[in-house]
Image (cartoon, rainbow, N blue to C red):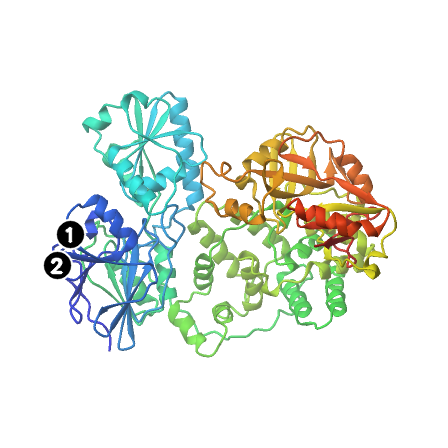
């Protein structure tokens, strides 16, 4: 039995006698979040724990609170189950999921599907009936990435201060103001908060959110500061008291040119805590409802958009929030399409069709040897430039790993581009899904099986360079849809996997390395070590062709793959393999840490290659004191009074929020350096360990960066007592190393052994 939904004092569910976001007092009320336009003076309220604490700060008074944690099940009325899901709108915001007699209903309230700097990430459950907020429910509202908006806000603030003026950012005191505050994090700017913003920011801190340093606004302190305030009229007494100010409104409506000077502001930036048009479409797709009710904003227009896509949708209120007449262009109907296609005849080797065929054949091949043969044969048909591009794309990457470049294309944008290119809609997709179990294959099957114009490897390379620089999802959508229009379903699959960095059908880099070595008769060891040093198959392919593999240097500020110690045993059979003297180091109980330093730039990486510089700023600062430029390997340990602390103490530090201004004050650290990979422009990986350590020993150490001592033992009989002594000092044990070997994490034969 479906749900009955009415628009009466918010949203009303008559079957259970509950109101959702009612403004007038009512007995049974769910409140989605703590904005005043969703709340009334109710005797009792059902909401999330976070929303309750914020409402108590905004609306003093006695009332009965029914609060629940996010995704905590409860019973809202007899035989009706409920749960709250994070809405991603403002701190504490939640959506309500109800279930009666097997039928589910989801009410969103205000929500944001994309990232929000100051809200719990939105989680989308499935539901039969969806009541969705549609403030920005027309295609023109596609917000740029929040990182770009943040850069523009920071530029506005810095330029305003440089002009000896005071920047004032307008944002609602709860939600938008805190997001503005987070945008300024790490900028070095001094921040002052309007009293209303101050009050709500402190309330958000009480429920667990953290923010950069701020102070309460005072006129005499405003010079060279950024002020955050709720939206104020241009002639307000509070605002006019700030001499020589410049204002900026933070709102999704900034996309409307005629709204840029709303409330008299000088600038406007599209920072929104609501879902944009593309997010709304994606949200509906994830919920997969039988019926959708739209409310607020462009409710009527968005309902029509859904109906054009074959989704049963009704608007609860016909009145448009902005009373604008914007045309909605329905998606054209598509012709029936087949789900399979054959590769194009007589295609050129550098075409995407040939690339796709080679990749599919290599993925399907059972043996490693056969995979290498397929890749090598494919390379043999390509020119030098295309070999380099193909080597990279076969690995499943649009850009080299070491470049740290990315496309940042969402699944939603990619999906919409495919549908648009196919001249298809959701009805066409659902029809194909009835016969195709794989949803990705069903979507791609809608593409033209016989496009007139194919694309080449070079076309893909140019496309990815352009997509990386795209200013917003709308531009990305345009570029992608045009590219998909020229591809058949098989080729479209290759593009989709590269765009989304889907490694499921990628070819292992070891196969590509061997394929290059086989095709160009190069030493496989040289190819592998070159790729180890630079993590760039495009560059490795060019160097293989040019016989320049040995000249590829170690990539700076990209983590090198690390050697890992094997487990050793304290017995004669194991120890007898080592020649005297035996190279012994202490096994520090800490975090493996690779450090890159050039001039004043320092980056730290953990054993998995994750950047951790921001978590250990004191180590980075100490690394700058060493005059050499270098890449070194070491272990980071918790440290106090010249003794190591247990790893559990370091874990406490790792669990601290990165925004914590006092992150280094409770757990002190020390980095023990034990190997050197690169120094002052020279790559040292091919040198034996004793030569690398000789160079490392020339470094001037300090209180936080030290060189791990080495002991050279003539007899294995000393090792048991050395192990006990090391563990008594708080270390994990000992490490035995072969000092004659070069650094080789690709070797199957370990050169390090741990004794515990």
Residue 376 in view, yes or no: yes
What SS does tag 1 mark?
loop
Q: Is residue 169 left or right of residue 417?
A: left
Extreme right residue here? 580
Question: Do the numbered discs 1 and 2 sit on residues whose CB atoms are within 8 Å?
Answer: yes
In the drawing, what numbered circle is on residue 26?
2
The quadrant in which residue 595 appears is: top right
* Residue at the disc numbered 1: 40
Quadrant of the snapshot with the N terminus: bottom left
Position in image of residue 93 (x %, y %)? 30, 53
Crowding around mark 1 (Cα neighbors within 10 Å: few <14, some 14 to 19, many 20+) is some
The quadrant in which residue 43 appears is: bottom left
In the drawing, what numbered circle is on residue 458?
none
Q: Is residue 630 left or right of residue 739?
A: left
Q: Between residue 219 and residue 622, name the one nearer to us.
A: 622
Q: Between residue 131 and residue 648, name the one nearer to us.
A: 648
What SS does tag 2 mark?
loop
Position in image of residue 512 (x %, y %)? 72, 59
- Judge whether 297 appears above or below 433 on screen: above
Residue occupying the point 62% across, 36% down: 642
Q: CA distance from mark 1 to mark 2?
A: 8 Å
Residue 687 in view, yes or no: no
Position in image of residue 289 (x %, y %)? 32, 69
């Amino acid at each position: 039995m479906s749900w009955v939904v009415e628009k009466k004092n918010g949203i009303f569910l008559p079957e259970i006698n509950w109101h959702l976001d009612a403004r007038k007092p009512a007995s049974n009320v769910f409140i989605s979040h703590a904005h005043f336009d969703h709340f009334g003076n109710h005797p009792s309220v059902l909401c999330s724990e976070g929303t309750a604490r914020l409402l108590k700060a905004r609306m003093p008074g006695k009332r009965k609170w029914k609060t629940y944690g996010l995704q905590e099940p409860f019973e809202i009325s007899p035989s009706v189950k409920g749960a709250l899901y994070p809405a991603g709108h403002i701190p504490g915001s939640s959506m309500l999921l109800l279930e009666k007699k097997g039928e589910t209903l989801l009410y969103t309230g205000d929500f944001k599907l994309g990232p929000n700097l100051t809200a719990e990430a939105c989680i989308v459950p499935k539901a039969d009936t969806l009541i969705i907020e549609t403030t920005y429910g027309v295609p023109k509202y596609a917000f740029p990435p929040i990182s770009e908006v943040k850069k523009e806000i920071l530029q506005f603030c810095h330029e305003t201060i440089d002009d000896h003026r005071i920047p004032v950012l307008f944002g609602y005191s709860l939600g938008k103001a805190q997001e503005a505050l987070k945008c300024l994090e790490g900028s070095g700017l001094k921040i002052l908060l309007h009293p209303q913003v101050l009050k709500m920011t402190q309330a958000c801190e009480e429920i667990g959110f953290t923010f950069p340093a701020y102070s309460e606004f005072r006129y005499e302190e405003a010079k060279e500061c950024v002020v955050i305030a709720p939206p104020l009229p241009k002639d307000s007494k509070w605002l006019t008291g700030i001499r020589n100010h410049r204002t900026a409104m933070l709102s999704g409506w900034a996309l409307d040119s005629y709204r840029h000077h709303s409330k008299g502001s000088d600038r406007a930036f599209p920072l929104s805590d609501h879902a944009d048009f593309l997010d709304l479409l994606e949200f509906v797709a994830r919920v997969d409802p039988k019926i959708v009710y739209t409310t607020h904003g462009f409710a009527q227009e968005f309902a029509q958009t859904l109906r054009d896509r074959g989704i049963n949708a009704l608007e609860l209120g016909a009145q448009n929030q902005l009373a604008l007449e914007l045309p909605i262009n329905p998606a054209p109907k598509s012709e029936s399409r087949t789900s399979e296609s054959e590769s194009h005849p007589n295609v050129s080797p550098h075409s995407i069709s040939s690339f796709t065929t080679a990749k599919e054949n290599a993925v399907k091949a059972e043996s490693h040897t056969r995979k290498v043969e397929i890749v090598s044969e494919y390379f043999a048909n390509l020119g030098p430039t295309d070999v380099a591009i193909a080597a990279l794309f076969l690995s499943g990457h649009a850009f080299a790993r070491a470049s740290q470049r990315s496309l940042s294309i969402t699944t939603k944008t990619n999906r919409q581009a495919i549908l648009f290119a196919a001249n298809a809609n959701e009805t066409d997709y659902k029809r194909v899904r009835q016969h195709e179990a794989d949803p990705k294959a069903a979507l791609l099957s809608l593409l033209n099986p016989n496009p007139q114009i194919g694309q080449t490897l070079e076309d893909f390379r140019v496309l990815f360079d352009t997509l990386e620089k795209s200013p917003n999802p709308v531009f990305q959508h345009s570029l992608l849809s045009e590219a998909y229009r020229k591809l058949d379903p098989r080729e479209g699959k290759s593009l989709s996997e590269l765009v989304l960095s889907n490694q499921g059908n990628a070819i292992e880099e070891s196969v590509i390395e061997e394929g290059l070595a086989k095709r160009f008769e190069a030493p496989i060891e040289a190819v592998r070590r070159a790729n180890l040093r630079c993590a760039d198959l495009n560059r490795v392919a060019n160097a293989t062709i040019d016989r320049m593999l040995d000249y590829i240097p170690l990539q700076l500020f990209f983590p090198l793959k690390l050697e890992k110690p094997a487990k050793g045993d304290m017995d004669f059979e194991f120890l007898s393999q080592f020649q005297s003297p035996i190279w012994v180091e202490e096994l520090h109980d800490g975090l493996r840490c690779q450090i890159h330093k050039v001039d004043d730039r320092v980056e730290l990486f953990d054993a998995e290659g994750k950047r951790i510089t921001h978590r250990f700023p004191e180590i980075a600062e100490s690394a700058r004191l060493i005059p050499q430029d270098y890449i070194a390997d070491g272990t980071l340990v918790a440290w106090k009074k010249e003794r190591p602390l247990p790893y559990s103490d370091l874990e406490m530090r790792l669990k601290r929020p990165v925004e914590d201004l006092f992150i280094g004050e409770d757990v002190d650290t020390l980095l023990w350096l034990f190997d050197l990979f690169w120094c002052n422009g020279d790559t040292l990986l091919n040198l034996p360990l004793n030569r690398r350590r000789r160079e490392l020993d020339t470094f001037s150490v300090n209180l936080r960066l030290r060189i791990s001592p080495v002991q050279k033992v003539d007899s294995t009989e000393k090792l048991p007592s050395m192990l006990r002594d090391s563990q008594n000092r708080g270390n994990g044990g000992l490490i035995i190393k072969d000092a004659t070997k070069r650094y080789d994490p690709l070797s199957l034969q370990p050169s390090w052994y741990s004794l515990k």
